[in-house]
Amino acid sequence: MTVTIFLGALLGPMALGVPIAFALIISGVALMMYLGMFDAQIVAQNVLNGADSFPLMAVPFFLLAGEVMNTGGLSRRIVDLAMAMVGHVRGGLGFVAIFAACVLSSLSGSAVADAAALGALLFPMMLKSGHDPARTGGLLASASIIGPIIPPSIGFILYGVVGGVSITKLFLAGIFPGLLIAGALCITWAIVARKEQFALPAKQSGAVRLKAFLDSIWALMLPLIIIIGLKFGVFTPTEAGVVAAVYSLFVSMVIYRELPPAKLFQVFVAAAKITSVVMFLVACAAVSAWLITVADVPGELASLVEPLMDNQTLLLLAIMGLVVVVGTAMDMTPTILIMTPVLMPIIKQAGIDPVYFGVLFIINNAIGLITPPVGTVLNVICGVSKLRMEELMKGVMPFLIAELIVLFLLVLFPELVTVPSSWFSR
């Protein structure tokens, strides 16, 4: 009954168009009334405590770094480097998009920021070369969701805060799975690109490649600084966000000189708007999370999945299937905030490593960014490319299937996550 009331109070307002943040508070209040313990002070206290978290301070800094990256020339130089290296091979522009997405993901941690950058820079270029518009948009959208997987990742930060899991371990564990997804996209693109007729860019000389590398070296240094700093304990994930923001500002304003002081206010306002949405969702989710614990919702769900508790693989497959369905109707941030406190006790009771589960959970939520009708990244690419959602969905389908295959391979073979993560942790 408790689960029914919680879901009804959450999904009902959402179906009526109530913003998710307020629906989270409504679901918490409904549980309080059902338990006979309604107190407005508890609601207010949990809202305040929900956003009062040191690790969460990394979110605004990484979002700021993403805005600076797109405005200050870091994104463009990464794309130029990829173009110089592999742009001349058959389907090379697609490989450029995947390579650039991997590097950009290690700068911003946001799929939306990466989608905006890749769409603006590469979509017109690929269209001019003769690539199919829908397939091009599908590739760019699918590559953009590597952003929340390869560190730094805002999704890992939210999951780590809500679930009480080491964010540093999550960051390091996400590197190899993110590269696996990139590899799957490369294979898929190589297959689908064979059917297209398009013009190939000229092969660049060694001098041009060297110039592109030297021009982008300041951008390439940022992911190395973050990963090395986290691995050797030089700074925490929160401090890494500050490092990323300050470094990107310095490079954009002093080295590349593409971010004039006059544009700083605009960049800060854009980052602040996105941050306010994320932080308000986190604060409101704290109300329902507290009530979920008090009402023992995880205990009720654990009893429902009890037949699967002895088989970790079947349990994970069931949970991943559920998250795929949820991802079609809910954005990444609210899904993490709502489902983490519900699923974490079940995961721990089943003896599953929370870091391993976190990687699977965030990959699944990232895939949800390219599944309609919500599909935030799809909407970004639609806006940049002027494609209709129906067209883009046809183009994204082969890459979506490839990413789902990788996800379920990671479920069936946990060592693909746990073993490589130990390499980075040494």
Image (cartoon, grey):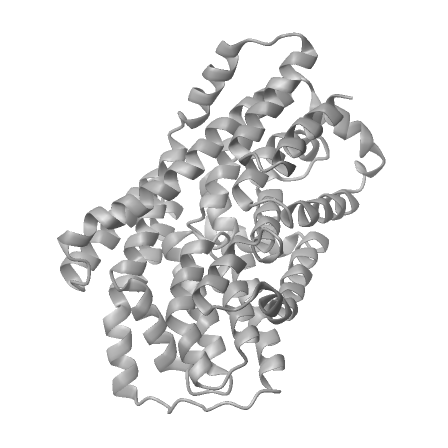
In-image side of 345 versus 82 (left or right): right
User: x, y percentage for residue 142?
Assistant: 55, 64
In-image side of 357 versus 51 (left or right): right
- Residue closer to the observer: 251 or 39: 39
Name the residue: 58% across, 58% down.
370
User: x, y percentage for residue 364?
Assistant: 62, 51
- Against 236, residue 213 (above or below) is below
In-image side of 332 versus 87 (left or right): right
- Residue closer to the observer: 296 or 308: 296
User: x, y percentage for residue 270?
Assistant: 31, 47
- Against 168, residue 141 (above or below) is below
In-image side of 164 versus 84 (left or right): right
The answer to whether residue 194 is seen in the rendering is yes
The answer to whether residue 59 is seen in the rendering is no
What quarter of the picture does the N terminus occupy? top right
- Against 90, residue 272 (above or below) is above
Name the residue: 59% across, 40% down.
335
Name the residue: 79% across, 36% down.
309
Residue lying at the far right in this picture: please name it: 307
- Give the number of callouts: 0
User: x, y percentage for residue 160?
Assistant: 50, 36
